């Protein structure tokens, strides 16, 4: 599904990622953990194609294509989805309208008929139910005036409607209370399937109690320094991030 | 420059879609302006003496006035003697049906998508099309006549309803009002006239399309709408102009009169040629629009979407004379490339419990400059007057500008006046967010801009709102990536 080789990324003049290697197979859930400034979010944003993140080396192969060759909107239409750490407000643009445009852009790319308003609403209402999201969210402007929790829930709602092949969650748990965390996690878990992969970026082990990963990778200073199973997250929780730092960096 | 900005700039470079010239024989008088020209215009139109006298009075007033320069726009001086003040398609015979309209002109209107076609007539739009200076065809007139509604060209109104014209022309915008209004009063060629009798609710949207075609002709149309007691009317005005290198002057006057319990809704989509991407050519749009809420509980709503013209200078205003009368102004003004707009409104509260609402949305892209200028005046007898103003500016790219000049003059302590203003930039983050959901950059920008204008668009009649949204997309195409 996804093969990242020696990925190097620069933000402005600062080198953030110094060679990431990661292979994600269909149906797998990979957690990326790491201390602040380790490059976790940079990795997520680079995969989504954020214009502020310049890839200076390496390659990313997604379903047999060069992902880095695609514009952000093309990546999305090919099934890559990123849930934002800080979802953006778009005043005056109705959430349902926005999502319909997004879904139909994707369907068009796939050679499917565009959904009309009726079919779209039917689909969306069903998703809302599964996610326990209030219907009023559809008629509000995209993220405008949403609480932190509502914004994150809206991201998961977008994901549920767009049904990505590869979902990247960028610190989706940050700023969520335990109830919101559960709602978000249930949404993600409901979408797990043998065809769909997830990359879950998080600072805290807590999220991984709800979304249980197949693999955990620890990022430090722009590189993956440890990879393992679920137990690696627990070990991290116990010992702290300092434990993962390369010997030379330890004090 | 960031990538998003660059792409925005690239988008801004889309060409004007309506730049074609219709090849019809035209009856144009030589360039220049003097009393003889005023007399010639009047005689060509077979006007009565009183109207000629009125024109001449206006012309003499104009001679003594100086062109105003307080507005926040820059343009090359206008050579008023280098303009022809009258152009009409030379075929002048009376037309009984649309089929008789010159095919060339019909083709032009078709290109513009004007609903002159029979099938489109069924969509309930009555159209008075002004081609350069003479009204070509007025549709649906007979149906309206059954209700006593008069909807015709200004020239016809002068012939058929001289008393109404005489009573109201210049009553809201006197010929002494300002430089361009005086000029218009002297040389106006045609326009639309609407009268809605007492208690009649006009059953369809009335619509006029203005189009400037001939080279070097100014267009000086004059519109007069009178809504008698308890009547209601919604009027749509759409404007386009072909591509011309020279700047063309457009100085229109629109007067609205709302009597007791009457409502007038006046909506404009203005898409005059804005000049090319280097700022060459384009229309100078210097327009005086004003309505008076003469009677109690009357209401006037101005809604405008201004995407064209090289320079726009207009302030559709309301004089709230009747008690409990309401004035509203909803505006979207877009400036791209080198376009400049200085637009806004004046709300003049004279009656008691008068209310006004101002919602202005300025969008600047490329090197466009957008100025909101609005005045709220509360007279000393206007007890409990209320005003709410909201001025929002959206910047696309980093070489454009937005300016806001609100003026307040309050002579009654019971007044409540609120003003809110904001300036924002289309963020790369907003664009990226849309893209990350699969929405292409251009669509994303259209979506963000439309969202920004939503409060104004929802005031437009449905059909117009769709057109306005499309126009917005077209005019920002070169500006937004």
Image (cartoon, coloured by chain):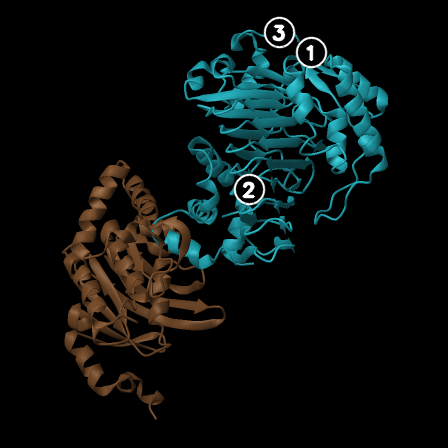
Secondary structure beneath disc 3?
loop
The x and y percentages for residue B371 are 63, 50
Q: Residue at point 46% right, 41% down?
A: B457
Q: Nearer the viewer, residue A241 or B321?
A: B321
Judged left or right of residue B85, residue B147 is left
Question: Measured along the vertical axis of the image, is residue B239 above or below residue B435?
Answer: above
Q: Chain of mark 2?
A: B
- Contact between marks 2 and 1 (CB within 8 A): the answer is no
Q: Residue at point 76% right, 32% down?
A: B182
Find disc 3 in the rendering and name its residue.
Answer: B94
Q: Chain of mark 3?
A: B
Chain in brown, by letter, is A
Q: Chain of mark 1?
A: B
Q: Residue at point 61% right, 36% down?
A: B292
Judged left or right of residue B379, residue B361 is left
Q: Nearer the viewer, residue A116 or B263?
A: B263
Front label number (2 vs 1): 2
The 10 Å Cα crowd at callout 2, few under 14, some 14 to 19, many 20 or more, is many
Secondary structure beneath disc 2?
loop
Front label number (3 vs 2): 2
């Amino acid at each position: 599904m996804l093969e990242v080789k020696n990925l190097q990324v620069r933000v402005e003049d600062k080198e953030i990622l110094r060679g990431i290697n990661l292979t994600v197979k269909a149906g797998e859930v990979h957690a990326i953990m790491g201390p602040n400034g380790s490059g976790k979010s940079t990795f997520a944003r680079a995969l989504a194609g954020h214009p502020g993140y310049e890839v200076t080396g390496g390659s990313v192969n997604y379903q047999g294509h060069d992902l880095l060759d695609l514009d952000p909107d093309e990546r999305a239409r090919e099934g890559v989805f990123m849930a934002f750490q800080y979802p953006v407000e778009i005043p005056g643009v109705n959430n349902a309208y926005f999502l319909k445009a997004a879904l139909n852009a994707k369907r068009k790319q796939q050679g499917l008929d565009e959904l009309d308003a009726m079919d779209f609403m039917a689909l969306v209402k069903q998703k809302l139910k599964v996610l326990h999201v209030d219907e009023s969210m559809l008629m509000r402007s995209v993220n405008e005036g949403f609480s932190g929790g509502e914004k994150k829930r809206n991201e998961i709602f977008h994901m549920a409607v767009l049904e990505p092949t590869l979902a990247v969650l960028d610190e989706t748990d940050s700023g969520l209370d335990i109830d919101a965390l559960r709602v978000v996690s249930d949404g993600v878990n409901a979408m797990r399937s043998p065809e769909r992969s997830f990359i879950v970026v998080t600072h805290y082990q807590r999220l991984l109690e709800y979304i249980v990963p197949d693999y955990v990778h620890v990022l430090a200073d722009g590189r993956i320094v440890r990879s393992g199973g679920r137990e690696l997250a627990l070990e991290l929780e116990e010992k702290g991030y300092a434990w993962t730092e390369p010997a030379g960096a330890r004090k | 420059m960031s990538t998003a900005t660059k792409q925005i700039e690239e988008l801004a470079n889309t060409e004007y879609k309506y730049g074609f010239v219709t090849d019809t024989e035209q009856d144009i008088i030589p360039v220049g302006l003097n009393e003889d020209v005023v007399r010639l215009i009047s005689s060509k139109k077979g006007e009565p003496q009183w109207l000629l006298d009125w024109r001449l009075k206006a012309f003499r007033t104009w001679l003594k006035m100086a062109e105003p320069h307080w507005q926040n726009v820059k343009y090359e001086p206008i050579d008023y003697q280098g303009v022809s003040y009258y152009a009409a398609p030379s075929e002048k015979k009376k037309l009984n049906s649309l089929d008789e309209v010159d095919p060339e002109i019909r083709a032009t209107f078709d290109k513009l998508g004007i609903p002159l076609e029979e099938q489109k007539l069924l969509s309930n739009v009555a159209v008075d099309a002004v081609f350069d200076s003479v009204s070509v065809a007025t549709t649906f007139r007979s149906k309206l006549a059954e209700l006593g509604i008069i909807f015709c060209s200004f020239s016809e109104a002068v012939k058929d309803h001289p008393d109404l014209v005489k009573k109201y022309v210049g009553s809201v915008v006197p010929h002494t009002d300002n430089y361009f209004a005086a000029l218009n009063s002297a040389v106006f060629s045609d326009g639309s006239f609407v009268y809605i009798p007492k208690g009649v609710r006009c059953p369809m949207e009335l619509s006029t399309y203005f189009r400037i075609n001939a080279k070097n002709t100014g267009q000086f149309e004059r519109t007069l709408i009178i809504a008698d007691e308890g009547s209601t009317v919604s009027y749509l005005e759409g404007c386009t102009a072909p591509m011309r290198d020279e700047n063309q002057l457009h100085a229109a006057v629109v007067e609205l009169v709302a009597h007791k319990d009457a409502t007038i809704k006046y909506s404009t989509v203005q898409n005059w040629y804005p000049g090319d991407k280097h700022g060459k050519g384009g229309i100078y749009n210097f327009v005086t629009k004003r309505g008076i809420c003469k009677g109690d509980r009357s209401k006037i709503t101005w809604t405008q979407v201004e995407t064209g013209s090289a320079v726009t200078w207009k302030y559709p205003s309301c004089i709230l004379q009747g008690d409990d009368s309401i004035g509203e102004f909803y505006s979207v003004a877009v400036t791209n490339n080198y376009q400049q707009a200085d637009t806004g409104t004046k709300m003049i509260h004279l009656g008691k419990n008068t209310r006004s609402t101002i919602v202005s949305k300025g969008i600047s892209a490329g090197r466009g400059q957008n100025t909101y200028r609005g005045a709220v005046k509360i007279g000393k007898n206007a007890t409990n007057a209320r005003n709410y103003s909201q001025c929002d500016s959206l910047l696309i790219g980093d070489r454009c500008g937005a300016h806001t000049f609100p003026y307040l003059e309050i002579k009654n302590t019971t007044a409540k006046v609120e003003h809110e203003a904001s300036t924002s930039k289309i963020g790369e983050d907003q664009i990226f967010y849309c893209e990350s959901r699969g929405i292409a950059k251009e669509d994303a920008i259209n979506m963000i801009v439309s969202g920004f204008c939503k409060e104004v668009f929802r005031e437009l009649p449905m059909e117009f709102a769709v057109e306005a949204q499309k126009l917005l997309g077209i005019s920002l195409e070169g500006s937004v990536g």
